[in-house]
Amino acid sequence: MTEIIGGYFTSHVPAIGGAIAKGLQSDPYWKPFFDGFPPIQKWLNQEKPDVAVVFYNDHGLNFFLDKMPTFAVGAADEYQSADEGWGLPVYKTFTGDPALSWHIIEALVGDEFDITTCQKMFVDHAMSIPFELAWPNVDAWPVKLVPIAINTVQHPLPSAKRCLALGRAVGRALESWESDDKIVVMGTGGLSHQLDGARAGFINSDYDRFCLDHLMNDPEALVQDSIAGIVEKAGTQGVEILNWIAARGALGARPLAKRTENYHIPISNTAAASVVLEAV
């Protein structure tokens, strides 16, 4: 029987990858952020999931402004990392789980979600950095990957309510998957930040705390704002909270316990957080 062990949520700022590459984890600027990850690493090493179903946003490796799907699901045998121009290392290749991917895709279409299916797909820092934080210094990723990309770039964006519904549909698909797999759900991105314009450097710790406080027991509270409202509260790139909302939806109504939480500002003009919600 498939087991969903819980959810792992984290920021995916490219500068984190630079800090890892330079060995700056104990640097005073970075240490408060990296201190949040030993409990996450311990939990994952104890639980040993087989598959990670990851909600994230693509940053131009697969989709650009001329072709931007609202929701896209990978169904490849493997997913290669690629150079995005940030000066980051090209990370390890991910092994896919196409059978589970197609099961999710068919379930989503059955639930009337119009999605893009990707049988070839690159992954960028939004995927690789959370994995590097969770499983540092490994020769190969210990889990298979099902990537689910959400448009957080080109308006119109999907509403927070629609992303929660997407996650819940994915959760139902996982519950109907007949296997012995242990699955971890991941949501990457955020929290509040804006990289350009008049509000460049904007951080709203009150909104971030609101999201952290309600994510586990009251995700409906996170979907009351319109996209414009989220942008106003969290910044233009703060809409990456949509990935967290979808991932929370995939955990369904099962009882959860907050295993660990860390929040730190700023990291490269971004509010950074990490959370584990454990199924109990």
Image (cartoon, rainbow, N blue to C red):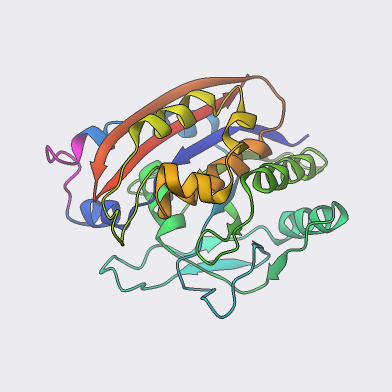
Give x and y (percent) for residue 269: 25, 49
**x 42%, y 33%: residue:** 207
Front-lying residue, 51 or 260? 260
Quadrant in which the C terminus is drawn: top right
Which residue is the extreme one toward the right? 110
Q: Is residue 90 left or right of residue 248?
A: left
Give x and y (percent) for residue 226: 59, 46
Front-lying residue, 206 or 277? 206
Q: Is residue 71 above or below residue 182?
A: below
Which residue is the extreme one toward the left? 28
Q: Is residue 236 above or below residue 79?
A: above
Q: Is residue 254 left or right of residue 51?
A: right
Quadrant in which the N terminus is drawn: top right
Give x and y (percent) for residue 72: 65, 63
Main SS, magenta region, reads loop
**x 77%, y 58%: residue:** 105
Give x and y (percent) for residue 246: 62, 44
Answer yes or no: is residue 86 visible. yes
- Total marks in image: 0
Q: Quadrant of residue 245?
A: top right
Q: Quadrant of residue 67?
A: bottom right
* Range of residues picked out in magenta: 23-31
Answer yes or no: is residue 140 visible. no
Q: Is residue 83 left or right of residue 182?
A: left
